Each structure stands twice: as structure tokens, then as C-alpha cells.
Amino acid sequence: MANHAVFRSSLVCLALVVVVVGICTQSFRKMMVTYLVGVVGIGGVLLPDWAYFDRDFSRWGTPVSVEERASANATAERSGFARLKRYPMRLAAYATIYGFALYNWWGFVSS
């Protein structure tokens, strides 16, 4: 990951959410579930090998070539989400997975 500040700030925000959940629910178990869901969510967005996943969905089954890796390193210098290409299949997969996780987390925390 090129920018460690984003990862650190995400973990700090997660810690604040865990504290708020703990204060509101008075449940250590719900705090731990919130922490685990948050860490997995942050890891799923910030830590993958974007040179591999920042390609068309149909090419995820093949290894990354040297040329693709070099072009990914050149685009990694751009900051934030501007370096990512927009693929509808990846967006649908992320929306489905994270939407399902957030829905179940909210059902657990609010019960």
C-alpha cells in the first residue's frame, strides 16, 4: 500500500466506531464483532494487490504480466481512488459483499 496514512486513519475511525458501539450497547461481544467486521472490511478495500485486481474481471484468472505490473506501479503514484479504474463487475461484487456484511452487522448490534 502506497499511502499508510489512509490505513492508519481508517483504523483510528474504526476504533472510534468500536468505542461508540461499546458505549451504546454496553456489550463487549458487540464491540469485538464490530472490530472484526471493520478490520476485515478495511483489509478488503485497502490491502489487496491492486495490480492484480485493477484489471478486467475476465482476466483475474491469469497472472499479472510484467507490463501490467509496470503500468500499475506508474499509476500507483496517483493518490486516493483516482488510481483505480472503474469496473462494474468489481463494484457489484464489493457492493454485494460489503452490503451483506453491514446488514448482518447492523442486525447484530441493534438487537
Image (cartoon, rainbow, N blue to C red):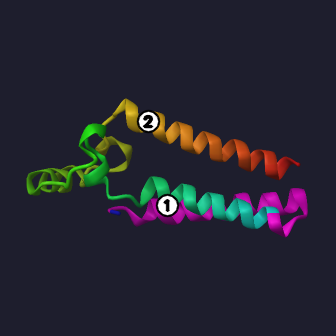
Which residues are drawn in magenta? 2-29
Q: Which of 22 and 108 is in front in this view?
A: 108
CA distance for labels 1 and 2: 16 Å
Q: Are marks 1 and 2 in contact (CB under 8 Å)?
A: no
User: Is label 1 in a helix, a strand or a loop?
Assistant: helix
Q: Residue type at mark 1?
A: Gly
Q: Residue at x 33, y 41 (%)?
A: 82
Q: Is residue 6 magenta?
A: yes
Residue 48 in the image, given as x and y percentages of width and height: 38, 58
Point out the residue furthest to the front here: 61
Query: Within 10 Å of the Cα at label 1, are there few (<14), some (14-19), or many (20+) other Cα atoms?
Result: few
Q: Is residue 44 visible?
A: yes
Q: Is residue 108 left or right of residue 4?
A: right
Judge the density around disc 2: few (<14), some (14-19), many (≥20) Cα neighbours within 10 Å. few
Q: Mark 2 highlights which residue?
A: 91
- Indicate which disc, 1 or 2, sits on the residue closer to the N terminus: 1
